[in-house]
Each structure stands twice: as C-alpha cells, then as structure tokens.
Amino acid sequence: MPDTNMLDATRLKFGIGQSVPRAEDPILLTGRGQYTDDIALPGQIWCAMVRSAYAHGVIRGIGTEAARAMPGVLGVWTGADLVAAGYGPMKCAMPLKNRDGSAIRTTYRHALATDKVRFVGDPVAFVVAETRSEAKDAAEMVELDIDMLPAVTQASAAAEASAPQLYDDIPGNLVLDFQQGDSTKVAAAFAGAAHVTRLAIRNNRIVVCAMEPRSAIGSFEDGRYVLRVGCQGVFGLRAQMANDVLKVPVQQVRVLTGHVGGSFGMKANAYPEYICLLHAAKELGRPVKWTDERTSSFLSDQHGRDHEVEAELALDAEGRFLAVRLTSFANMGAYLSTVSPLMGTANFWKNVQSNYRTPQIEVVTRSLLTNTTPVSAYRGAGRPEGNYFMERLIEAAAQEMGLSAIELRRRNHIRPEEMPYAAASGSTYDGGDFTALLDRTLEAADLPGFAARKQASAAKGLLRGLGIGNFLECTAPPTKEQGGIRFEKDGTVTIITGTLDYGQGHWSAFAQVLHQSIGIPFHQIRLLQGDSDELVAGGGTGGSKSLMASGAAIVEASELVVEKGRAAAAWALEAAVADIEFEAHPTDGEGRFLIAGTDRGIGIMDLAARLRQAPSVPEGVPATLDVTHVFDQAPQSYPNGCHVAEVEIDPETGIVSIVRYLSVNDFGVIVNPMLVAGQAHGGIAQGIGQALLESVAFGEDGQMQTGSYLDYALPRAGDMPAIDFISHPVPAKTNPLGAKGCGEAGCAGSLPAVMNALVDALSTYGIRHIDMPATPERVWQAIQAAQRAA
C-alpha cells in the first residue's frame, strides 16, 4: 500500500489537509438531527427526580404516600428500594496513591442517597408517571424529613479540624494526599535559587453548560437493559453500567447514542438518573424517559475546575528555571466521580512543565470532599491549568527580576535539537519547535505596533494590555480503539468507531482519512459510533485523542482491506495475487486494484459489490472486504502553541474588552483545517468565559448562588473577539497520521493569554495578579484598592 500520508493532499478534494464541511451539518441544519430528547418510544412514560434542598443533613424519613396517590403516577422509589434491588455504587476509577503509598479513599455513590444528603441537588427519590407534568407534580409531593447539618463548600475550609465531616470513614474529608516529584531535590533547588516567584492562584469552579441538557431513556428489551443517552463513548459507559452498577454481564446491556449537543467531559460517565430509569423500566415493563431542566442541571451535572493553588518558580541569576512547585487544595464535591482526582494531581504534574526546560517539578495536592456538586473533567481537565500556572509565574518572575518575559520564555524553551526530550514530568516530547513558533506568533501579532495601539487606547481613557499564552499540553494516551470498515449493500461504506462525536465533526475527518488511505469516495462513507452492540473496543472521546486513536485505527484497517482486496481482485481479474497492485488514487479518484504492467483492473467499490453478488468464492478468497480491527495504543501527543490577546479596560467601570486575538498552533498533521480552527475557537471561548465571566458561588449554607443564567455569566457574541488562527505544524512521530490533539488546546492558550493581558494593562497601578474571573466588579475593586494604597 502506498504511503498515503506522503501524497499531495492538495490534489484530493476530500483528502487530508482539506477544509471539507462537516458531513452532519445538512442533517442538523434541516432539523433532521436526533438528540435523546427527540426520541419518543412506544409506551414511553416519564421520570422526575426528587432532590435535596439542603447541602448537608441526615435523612430521617421520606414520605411517598401523597406522591403515589397523584394522577398518572406509576411508581415512587427511594434509595432503600434500589439498594434492595442489588445495584452497585458508582465509584472513582483512578488508581491514585497517597504520598505514603496507601490507596485513595473513595466514595461509593448509590443512585439515591440513603443515609445523608451531601449537596443541594443530591437525589433522594424518583417518581414515574404517564406524563412529564404528572411526574413533576408528584415529585413535589414527596416529603423529606432531613436534619440539617453545617455545610462546607471550599476545599481549604474542608481541611480544617473544625470542618463538618461528610463521611464517618473519611476523616478530615481527605480522600487523597497526593505528592509527586523529588521533594529533597526541589527543596534544594528553591534554597539555592537566585530568585523565587510565588503566586496564590484560584482556579474558579465552572458549570459545564452544554447546549443540550442531559437526557436519557431506559428500557428493558428481550432481557437486556437498553440505555439511550447522550454520552462520550458507548463502549465505556456500557462497561461502567454493567460491571459497577447493574452487576450483569456486559452482553446484557446496550447503550445507544445519537446526536449529542456538547459535553466537554461532563457526559462521559454514569449518573444516578440512568440507574433509576433502567430500574423503573424493568419493573414497569415500559420505556422510561427523563430530560433535565437547566436549573436542575446546574446542580446535578458535574462541575469543572475548582482548585486553590500556591504556585512557585525557582530561577537562577540568568533567569533559567530550576524548579516549579504547585501546592494545592482540590475540591472534589460531595462524591468522587469517575476521574475527579485526576485534574489537580497527575494532570497538573504532566502539564505544568509546558514547553520549558524545567529540571525539577513537585506537585502536592490535597483532594477534599465538600458539600457541593461533584467535580469532574471539564475541557482540558487540568491541562489548561498547568499551563496557566506556569505562564502566570513567568510573567511575575520577569517583572520581579527586571527581565523581558518574552526573552525569559526563549531562554528556557526546549530546543529542537534536544528532541526527543525526557521531561521531568515523565513525558518524552517527540518533537516541537517552540521558539520558532513563539517568534512567528509575535510577528503575526505585530508586537512592534503595540505601543501605538496602547497610546491610542489611552487617548480614549482606556488601559491596554498585551498577554502571551505559550502552552504545551499532554493529551490522553490513545487506548485500544476500533477501526471497523464495512461495505454495505447500498454501496456505502461504514466506519465503525468507539470514539464518539459530540460536536467535533468526526464524520468528515474520519471519512477524509479513509478516502485518502484507500480511495473510498468521500460521499459514500458513513460513520457508526453510537451503538455498543457494534463495538469490540472503544476508548470514547476525551483527552484530545480521537484522531490519533480512530485515525490510526482507520489507517491500519485500510491496510487490511487492501490485503483482503488483493486476494479478491486476483480472483475477479483471473490473475495471481502477487501480480495485483493497489492504487489509492488513480485519475478517476476511486481506489483501484490493477494487474501489474497492464491497464486491467477493478475499482474497490466494484470489487466489494462483486463479492456481495457472488453465490460463492473459492477457498482463500475473502467473501467480503469488511474488516473489524482494533488499534492497540499509541503514546500521547504534545500539541503546543502560542496565543496573544490584547485587552482594553475602562478604569471607571472595570469592564474588560478583548480587542485583538491571535492563535498560532502546532497540532501536527491537520486533517481538516476548518474543523481544527473551529475546535480552537470553541476552546478559546470557554477559556475567555472562565477568565472574565464564569464562576460558581455557594453560600455558607451550601446553597448555590449562581443557579441560573441570571446569575451565571456565559460569554456572548459581543464578548468574543475576532480570532486569527495560524498553523505551524511539526508532525508527531507517535502515530501513523502525525496528528496531535486539538480539542482542548484553545483553553490552554486562552487562560494565560487573557489574564496576562489583563495584568499587563493593570500594571500601571502596580497590580501584579488578579484571579479569575476578572469581572468588572473585581477589576474595579482592584483598581480602587491599588489607588488607595498608592
């Protein structure tokens, strides 16, 4: 098979490197998409959840009689009912260790609370009725007898000796005392440093705010549990539901997913509602549906971020990095989710190094339980934060030492000649040209012209600042992933994958890889991704690894198709297998098998049809060209780049406007530039939201004070700048496509770029740091405080 990656992609309209529109867009734009809430099954009934209005308390009783008597009600269940049914708990999947080598203390969360409620929104019962309104009305009639207890909502406060205790068997609310790095060497580096910079940084809590609220339908069909739900990977969710919760063989569970309106980590794993639906469906013999409402989703959907960090950077007299140390409190919420301890521990450790030569790293994190909504992965899941901490430290260190922050970055960049580079974080960077990328960014950002732009802003009474966000993130390593290829009776070809598109545009990108690999006509390629019955492997979508995993699986599966095709073509063309050659892209554009040295051949689609129509084939000739292949795994990749933001601040109001934005990125080989730019834009928007607008607030009693869009500010169109996107690729050496992840990198660059620009603008008042979100009130207060202190 020819090396299709080396083909001139510009001659392939639908090949790698082309901005092919998303194949699903015509379906979605014409209203033919099918999200979970669009589904209505025959005999379908409705579920409504009963949630705690208190953040912490002992359950003394749950009165269900009034609810059962309401019109249309078919059943009311409590936690005791589900425990009696034998369902297992949801639990954390991260095998992290405490610094003393002991295992993490985990919570075992049942679908409904039985002993205590531990956050506002904790589900305690559910009602099923004929209609949604009847279920909601009845849910309001469930009577809860709860003895209220004091609540704690901040991780550092939960660590105090006087803090309320959420669990009797988890003393001090501490689930994990994590430490990684050589403490002795790090301490020595700080002791011998010419300069040490320290910053206290708050990584604010975020509501995920997916466009599509969570929704699910549970049914029990032919002795099997069937869950229709928006998620990030049906194969992994099926395993979690079957093995941990339902306690049945995975063959007795089917998970189906259609279109998904965003997730960003939040919809990846099991939730209490899914267990309730499946239980009721089995008991009542009818499909049971539940769709969340936005206010409830603010409480029940897993949140993101929420860390309190002391970041430290040690430098020698020339400004060379000696060590970086992060000491953190990580808020887990009331229960450990599947991956909740990962972000503030291993992902801080892997990503704080960024693209800098840093000999020593130490991360110390205390992960604590609080009376708040559980926290889990949110776009980047610790990767943007690690980069943010380093970039803020660099800016502060440069100011303190009287150095150029740009020169400080250049001085500490890992050089191309040092690749592969064994980082202190344990990663091995396979390639990158970090200084050249930074220089290209500064040129494109017109750094010399900034002084004039700053002066023009000052003439309007505005403060102007410029911020750099130089980043490198460690993607999740691709695990086993399916790359099935099936030639259908209708003349189409189906790619079967275990990753799952929830807005990224996988269909087009995967089809481009298959089209370039073996010349399948682009418009005849379909994508099957949301049916666990069709999968033999699947790592789901998350950690910016989909193209590396599924793309590699498709490339390898394509090679197997060609191998089978040679034998089939030899039969069809009455030639020896050794004489059969394959050309992926002849002049007619369709992959073709040829007899060497002749013009006799057969197209790959015609060959597949010929095999389908043949009554039989001789021994040794494949009956189809179909392939079920599992890509084993590959190392993680290291996307990197540099963002430059310019902001204007009105000192009279504290209002911040982003007036210029540039993103230059090394995402390796880019399959579809348009989709990649879109992914970058989305990540940048979410980074801007966290930097300037978004933050979850709780009262002392644990009540969420930002429980709707009246109080929780998402960025709107007017808050977003025009974003310039430039690609500066260095192909990865760790996967067949040479690709690097791109889905989360927008956050990694935007957080530091925006906040560094903000601090640069405020530096005229002597302000050296401000925490996210830099709301107008917070900025105005910082200016007022600085003026009073002057």
Image: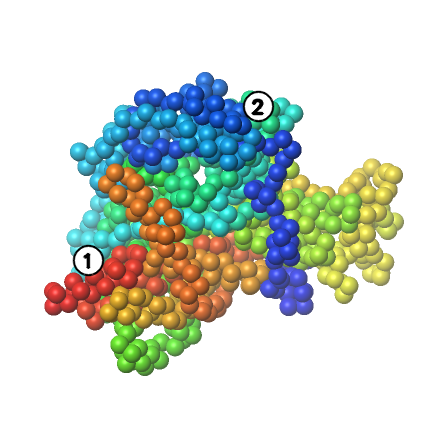
Q: Residues within 10 Å of mark 2 (few under 14, many from 20)?
A: some
Q: CA distance from mark 2 to mark 1?
A: 65 Å
- Helix, strand or loop at mark 2: helix
Q: Which mark is residue 196?
A: 1
Residue 117 visible in the snapshot: yes
Residue 312 rendering spot, x and y as whole percentages: 23, 54
Q: What amino acid type is highlighted by mark number 2?
A: Leu
Residue 790 rendering spot, x and y as whole percentages: 11, 68
Q: Quadrant of the N terminus?
A: bottom right
* Residue 316, image quadrant: bottom left
- Helix, strand or loop at mark 1: strand
* Residue 436, image quadrant: bottom left
Q: Which residue is mark 2?
A: 284
Residue 656 rendering spot, x and y as whole percentages: 32, 66
Residue 356 rendering spot, x and y as whole percentages: 34, 59
Number of labelled discs? Answer: 2
In-image side of 374 versus 16 (left or right): left
Q: Is residue 466 above or below residue 743?
A: below
